[in-house]
Image: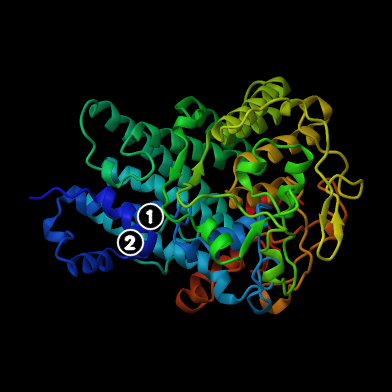
Amino acid sequence: MKKYNYKTILIAISAGILTLFASCTGLFEEYNKHQTNPGPGDMTTAERVGILFPGMLYLMHNFQENDNQMIEQMIGNQYGGYMATTNNWQGTNFGTFNPSANWVEYPFNKLFTGFYANYFQISDITQRKGYIYAWANIVRVAVMLRVTDMYGPIPYTKMGGGQLAVEYDDVQTVYHAMIDDLNNSIAALTSFVAESQGKANPMADYDLVYNGDFSKWIKFANSLKLRMAVRIGLVDTDYAKQMMDEAIAGGTIETNADNAFLPTEDNPYRKSAFDWGDLAVNATLSAYMNGWSDPRRAVYMTQTADFTYRGVRMGINNISKDTYSSNLYSKPNFTHTSPLLVFCAAETYFLKAEAALRGWIAGGEAQARTFYEQGITVSMEQHGVPIGTYLSTATNPASYNDPTPNTTFNLASTTNGGAVTVSWTSGTTTNARLEKIITQKWLANYPLGFETWNDFRRTSYPRIMPSVNNLSSVSSGGIVNNPTSINPNSTSPTTAIRLVRRLPYPVSEYNGNPANVGAAVANLLEGPDEFATNLWWARKQP
């Protein structure tokens, strides 16, 4: 039997037809149309299973250009303060809080339905055991975590047998079940790695992240576990502390050599920004990086025609694409082959810094500072820039000025919370230091917008500029509180809910799974099915 190089095939076709992997049958049919491509009869068992993985892996950070725009760009990177869309789309936009219903349901359908089409087949072929099934469950957690963090309660524990219309679990149950899955996968892969020393891994061709090095997938799983435990630390503290200790002891991603990336040949951020003119850097990002002369600035964004770095405010109603995609505004500075980040070592250090600062792990404030400064240092190394005197920076983010309507926004004004700097010693309160940690984590995690949106919802950090125009309404997902100031320490009722807190459930769920989604809204969601309802792990926060 001929041995095909599936990794070469998969990377090559990913630029145009990655969506085939949403259905294994569709993939096989496509192969069978061409005499030089392998069909099911030409594949070994390992190949038949392995070829299902790339489509699932790319759901951890969507690569396909339309999926990336609809999910990563429109939602995660706007609400996370990294990017702003510059296409007005006939007046509907996530940034102005009036997206169309089909836009709101797009992430759910793409991530949820798209993932399980392949996962169910892997489950059947592996009979739900072994190292391949363990690997699939790590990917499952990484993808479904994105879904539950966007929408809230989702079906998880009862998923099986190929059925999608099943009961929902509350978010706490989902998190616990996901961590159980990670624990089981870590144990299975640990045994596999120990038993397979010196042997070739037949899954290497299909592992677009670590090339079949499952010792790194163990670190990835522990890192996900740490991320999840910190996220729920304020609402499930005892359990979360135990999971943090286990994750750290098990070994997390702490060097850039272990960072998780997905390869690209036609980076979707670059395509959207440069080919379509639909995307710019967010004004929040440029203001922070300008004020701190951040060495990563030229890596993250392009310089403007007037030799500065200038982003675009989120949520400008009827935004002029010709104006805001011009060279007066910075674009995300990706090349055609820039890989897509899934998890980086810097995030691990910031997670541990927050945990130490809050007393969830040992070390206290002194250890929190060490982790904080390690996180910044590792991020600078990841991007190949000198750190210089950045750690002692005591200046504030720059005041943002948009020359088109000639408006300004000062993130460090008294109204917006006052000074915010890099230097650890320039802030003496716990809140000030927590803000430093979360803000630097945000800068290091670029462009993982969903992670920043999660942090913003649970901590109110970093300070993200509000939408210029608020077009929210009862008919488009509910009213969104969009204050003109963004003071993270405010307790005013008018700023108790800031920006979008979640996405409403898809119309397709109400049509195809009505009893279960109805029960979830009535009994599990802790509020109406609207943008303004906090998720479980954010409910104790503004």
Q: Secondary structure at mark 1?
A: helix
In the depicted view, which residue is nearer to us: 491 or 202? 202
Type of amino acid at the residue the image marks with label 2: Phe
Is any part of residue 378 visible from this angle?
Answer: yes
Identify the image quadrant of residue 200. top left
Q: Residue at x 70, y 35 (%)?
A: 437
Tag 2 near tag 1, CB within 8 Å: yes
Indicate left or right for 518 with 417 as reference: left
Identify the image quadrant of residue 63. bottom left
Give how far across and how far down residue 191 sits, in percent: 29, 30
Type of amino acid at the residue the image marks with label 1: Met
Mark 2 vs 1, N-terminal side: 2
Indicate left or right for 119 with 353 as reference: left
Residue farthest along the right direction in this orientation: 414
In this rendering, is residue 370 above or below 145? above
Mark sitting on residue 97: none
In this rendering, is residue 391 above or below 420? above
Is any part of residue 170 visible from this angle?
Answer: no
Give how far across and how far down residue 128 sits, in percent: 28, 49
Indicate left or right for 225 with 279 as reference: left
Give how far across and how far down residue 471 sits, in percent: 75, 73
Labels in figure, total: 2
Q: Secondary structure at mark 2?
A: helix
Mark sitting on residue 21: 2
Indicate left or right for 488 with 261 as reference: right
Q: Residue at x 70, y 53 (%)?
A: 304
Classify mark 1: residues with Cα within 10 Å, few (<14), some (14-19) or many (20+).
Answer: many
Residue that mark 1 sits on: 56
